[in-house]
Amino acid sequence: MAGKVKWVTDIEKSVLINNFEKRGWVQVTENEDWNFYWMSVQTIRNVFSVETGYRLSDDQIVNHFPNHYELTRKDLMVKNIKRYRKELEKEGSPLAEKDENGKYLYLFVSQSNKEAYVISLYINNPLLIGGRKFDLRLYVLVSTYRPLRCYMYKLGFCRFCTVKYTPSTSELDNMFVHLTNVAIQKHGDDYNHIHGGKWTVSNLRLYLESTRGKEVTSKLFDEIHWIIVQSLKAVAVNASPSLTSSTANDRILKYNLINDTLNIAVPNGEIPDCKWNKSPPKEVLGNYEILYDEELAQGDGADRELRSRQGQSQGPRAGRSRDSGRAVLTTWK
Amino acid sequence: MLQEESDLSLIIAQIVQKLKGSNLYSQLERQAWGSWEKRILKSLNSMCTELSIPLARKRPVGEQKELLNKWNEMGTDEPDLSLFRPVYAPKDFLEVLINLRNPNYENGDSLSFRTHLGLIQVPLKVKDIPELKECFVELGLNTGQLGIDDSTQVPPELFENEHVRIGQKVLAEQDSAAAQQYIRQGSPTALRAELWALILNISSEPEDVLYYEQLKTNVIQHDLLVDSLIYKDVKLTASNDDYYFVFEDYLYQVLLCFSRDTSVLSHFAYNSASPPKSYIRGKLGLEEYAVFYPPNGVIPFHGFSMYVAPLCFLYHEPSKLYQIFREMYVRFFFRLHSISSHPSGIVSLCLLFETLLQTYLPQLFYHLREIGAQPLRISFKWMVRAFSGYLATDQLLLLWDRILGYNSLEILAVLAAAVFAFRAVNLMEVTSLAAAEAVLADLSTLKVMPLLQIFLFATVT
C-alpha cells in the first residue's frame, strides 16, 4: 500500500475539494506526478487531442473517457449513432431494422446535402404534474466502457417549469414553459428561490405509482434505464454535470454525489492501478445502484438486452439492482 | 349576501343552541371553547375593520370572468397579502390548552395526575403502553408491515407480494370494513388512493361532481375575507415545501370551495365547538339574522393547507380530491384544533404524549423540563398538522394509513413520543429550548413504522 493519492483539479469547487481533502489525499500540480485529475472539458480536449499524444500511466485516472469530449454535441452524436447502428446490424439486432424503403425505423435522422441532423421528436402531450412540465436530471457514473460498467445515482431529480403548460402554439414562444433548464428558469418572474422547483426521483416514483399504478411506473423507469444504457453504448454522454450549487440542499446533494463517485472510482482511497478488476463491492456504492454491469450480465449467458418483452425476468446475478424494477428489458417497439 | 346558506344555517344554529344547553357538553368544554372562539372571531373582525374589507362580497361580473379563466392557475396571482395575518397559529392554540383547567377538578382526585409535570393540566384518561400494544396489535414485531417489510433488503415473497394480493382482493370486493382492517399493515402505493376512498366511503357519483361544481360557482360569484387567509397560508406553507409546491393550484381549488361548503357544518353536531357566527349588516345580535362565517364554520389557521397537500399525491381529479379531503376533515382533522375530551382530540393527544414521555423516558423528560424545553412545545405543531410537512411524503402516507385503519389519531402522540425516544441521546446533551428544537428540526429522514414498532413493542416497560 503505497502513499496517499495525489490529486489535481482545474475546477475550483468546494464539493470536489472538500471530498479530496477529507480522504487525506494530497494536492499537487499537473506537472507533478498525479494519480487523480478531475478535469474540465477544455483540459480533457487538450490532454487527449491527437497532437499531444498524451498517455495515462497505470496509476493515473481522470474523470472522463478519452473519446467522450467529442460527444457533448448532438451533431457528433450522429456519427456515433451511425457507427453503432452498423454494429447492431451485424449482430442482427431489431434496433437496426429498416422498413421497406430501406430507411431505419428508429431514431430520427434526416439527411440533406450530405449533412445529417439529429432531430428530437417534440412531444406535445407531455406528462404533467400539477399542470407543469418537468425534466429529469439523472447522474450516471461509468467506471469502465469495456466491459461496460455504469451506475445510476439514486438521488436524481426532476425540475419543474414554473409556468403552467399549454399546448397552444403561441406558448411555443414562451421559453419558460418549454425549457426547464434551471439557468433559464431563474429569470422567470415566478422562480421560487427557496427550492428551485425540484422533486427527487423517488418522489416522482411515489406520485406515479400512487396515481398511475405500479406496472406503468416500473415500465417507465425500466425504459429510462434502458435508454441510458443504449446511449452509453453509442457513447453519447454529456461531458460535465454542473457542479455549481443553487441552494444549500443542492450543495449537499452534489457533495454526497462526488463522495459516492470517488468511492467507486477510487476504491479504498488507494492509488489507482489499471490492472485492477474494477467491480467494487456493494457496500461502497452509497447512493449509486448498478445500472448495467456487462460482465455480470454476460456471465449469465447471452446478452440480455434487446430481448423481447415476453422474455424471462432477470435472475439475481444480472447486472441490475432490485430497485430498478424486476420487469424485463423493453425494446423501442 | 349568502341567503341560500343562511336558511340552512339558521336551522343548524338552532340545533347547536339546543345541544349547547344540554348535559352533553361539559362545563369545561363550553367555557374553554367559548373564550377561544371569541378570541378568534375578534381577531377576524378586527382584521376586517382595519382593512375595511367586508367578510363577504359579491364579485362584479368582470372579476368573475377573470377568476374563471384563471381557475387552474390561481397560484400565479400575486394579490397583496402583506396586511393579512393568520387568524392564529398552532402555538397560540397551545397557550389556550395549557391554561385549561377543569373547574370540577378536586385535588383529591387521581393521585397520579398530581405528579404530572407536563403542560396539560386536564386529567383526561389516556392509554399506557400495555393498552396501546393491545390497541395497535397489528403493528407488532411478528406482523408484516409496509414501511418495514417492503424494504429492499427483504425479499418480496416474504410479505409484500401476498399483502398486495390481499389488497387487490379487498378492492375487488369493495369491502370497506375489510379495507380498514387491511390497511393497519400499510397500503401498497398503487392501491392507496382506492383503499382510502373505500374506507372513507367516497365514490364519485355525478351528483358529487355537480356539488363540487356548485361550490366552484359559489367561489366565482362571491369573495370571502377568508379567501385571502387561505391564499396567504398556501403561499407561506405548501408553496415552500419540497414535496407539495407542485400542487399549489390544487390547494386553492380545494380550500376555497371548502370554506363555502355548508355540509361541513354538520360535523359540529359531534364537535364540542360551535361554528363562528356573524350577523347580517344592521342586525347584530338578532339570532334570526345570524349566519355562519365562513359558511363551513371553519376558520383556517396557519398551516391549515397542509392537511390537503399530501392528498394531492393520490388524487388529481379536483372533485375527488375535494371529497376525500372533506371526509378526512370531518372525521379526523377537525379534532386537532378543537377543544374536547375525545380520546382523539388534541387535548388527549397532548396528554398522551406527555404521559408516555414522563412514564417511559423520565430522565429525558426531566432534563428537558429543567432546561426550559417542555417537550410538548416542540411536538405540538407536529400533532396539530398530523405530521404533514414534517415527514417525507411516503412516510406520512404510511402514517395516515394507520389513522384510517385504527380510526384514531392516538398514533400521532405515540409517534411524537417515539421521535423523542429516538433522538434521546442528542437531546440529553442540549441545554436550551433552541438547541432542543434544532435536534428535532428535521424529521424528513425518519422511518415511522420502525420507530413506532420499537417504541411500542421493543421498549422495556
Image: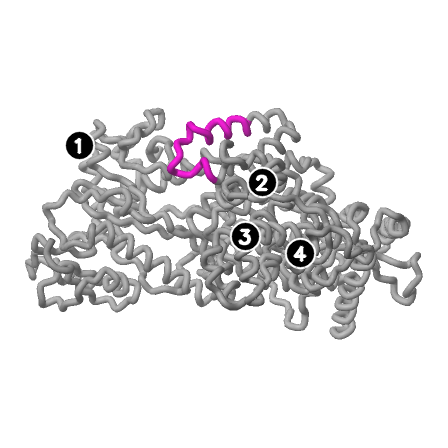
> Which residue is found at the position 86% from the left and 49% from the top?
B12
| Residue B227 seen | no
Left or right, A130 with respect to B14, comes to left
**Contact (CB < 8 A) between labels 1 and 4?**
no
Label 1 vs label 2: CA separation?
Answer: 54 Å
Q: Is residue B153 magenta?
A: yes
Q: Which residues are magenta?
A: B148-168
Kind of residue indicated by mark 3: Leu
Judging from the image, mark 4 belongs to the subunit labelled B
Q: Position of residue B211 (x, y in %)?
A: 74, 44
Residue B115's disc is 4
Q: Which residue is mark 3?
A: B361
Kind of residue indicated by mark 4: Thr
**Contact (CB < 8 A) between labels 4 and 2?**
no
- The secondary structure type at the circle numbered 2 is helix
Question: Which circle, 1 or 4, is nearer the viewer?
Answer: 4
Residue A90's disc is 1
Left or right, A61 with respect to B390, comes to left
Q: Position of residue A184 (x, y in %)?
A: 41, 63
Label 3 vs label 2: CA separation?
Answer: 27 Å
Judging from the image, mark 1 belongs to the subunit labelled A
Kind of residue indicated by mark 1: Lys
Q: Position of residue B270 (x, y in %)?
A: 79, 45
Q: Is residue B70 magenta?
A: no
| Residue A298 seen | yes
Label 3 vs label 1: CA separation?
Answer: 70 Å
User: In the rendered view of the protein, which quadrant contains the C terminus of chain B?
Assistant: top right
In the image shown, does B355 or B28 lie closer to the viewer?
B355
Left or right, A211 with respect to A73, comes to right
